[in-house]
Image (spheres, rainbow, N blue to C red):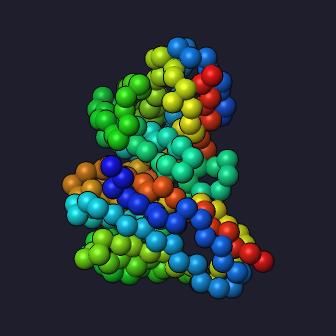
Amino acid sequence: NAGVTQTPKFRILKIGQSMTLQCTQDMNHNYMYWYRQDPGMGLKLIYYSVGAGITDKGEVPNGYNVSRSTTEDFPLRLELAAPSQTSVYFCATGPGARLYNEKLFFGSGTQLSVL
Amino acid sequence: DQQVKQNSPSLSVQEGRISILNCDYTNSMFDYFLWYKKYPAEGPTFLISISSIKDKNEDGRFTVFLNKSAKHLSLHIVPSQPGDSAVYFCAARTSGTYKYIFGTGTRLKVLA
């Protein structure tokens, strides 16, 4: 099992360009998340999804779009890249059982620079 | 508005001693708390968790304490090992939701 797979691992964009960060999971988890990690700022929730066709905003959704057409995939779209979106992006999944032993599983991240 | 705060950006501890990492939160609707560990160039990995109905949870060298009245939790690592050197994040889940909010992280360095 691959777990949570993110592609690409690194990317440099020019201001105004667009791109899609891919996230695929083979854990059959209902819940998927996108976080960004900025230095000294911890992990900020961008968007999350509770299942195919259902998405919701997190703490910092502006400048991003998501879709969830399948259980396995949760791509994150940047339409007009800005320097403020330079960050490391992490995708995570969770079974969504709302139990007190639940945990999130993270991918290895995508390092994005917007210049 | 930072709902989950880790006020110590870094911590250095001698090998074999106790490491104590702290986390404060502001939202009284959080009902479940987790600690994650992150090595450079890797994603965070789950360490230990605690529900709001408990005040302590242990797993080997790791113990998490929760003080709901103070809205404070801490992670104790005993004894600390050089391999524990990493960034530690606390996270909290709002009751009735699946939103997990993370703190800013504490970089732990265990000195051999």
Residue sitting farthest toward the top: A16
Which residue is pictured at 55% across the width and 62% down the height?
B9
Say if residue B94 shows up in the picture.
yes
How many labels, in total? 0
**Quadrant of the image occupied by residue B65:** bottom left
Q: Left of A57 or right of it: where is B28?
A: left
Residue A16 position (above or below residue A93): above
Q: Picture coordinates of residue A15 (x, y %)? A: 56, 17
User: Closer to the camera, A114 or B43?
Assistant: A114
User: Closer to the camera, B103 or A35?
Assistant: B103
Q: Left of A11 or right of it: where is A80?
A: left
Residue A66 position (above or below residue B78): above
Which residue is pictured at 54% across the width and 43% down the height?
A38
**Quadrant of the image occupied by residue B37:** bottom right
Q: Picture coordinates of residue B5 (x, y %)? A: 41, 60
User: Closer to the camera, B31 or B10?
Assistant: B10
Please state, as top left, top right, bottom left or bottom right, where the C terminus of chain A lies in the image: top right
Which residue is pictured at 59% across the width and 65% down the height?
B10
Q: Left of B38 or right of it: where is A25?
A: left
Which residue is pictured at 52% across the width and 14% down the height?
A16
Q: Picture coordinates of residue A22 (x, y %)? A: 53, 29
Q: Picture coordinates of residue A81 (x, y %)? A: 51, 20
Residue A2 position (above or below residue A66): below
Q: Left of B56 or right of it: where is B18?
A: right
Say if residue A2 shows up in the picture.
no
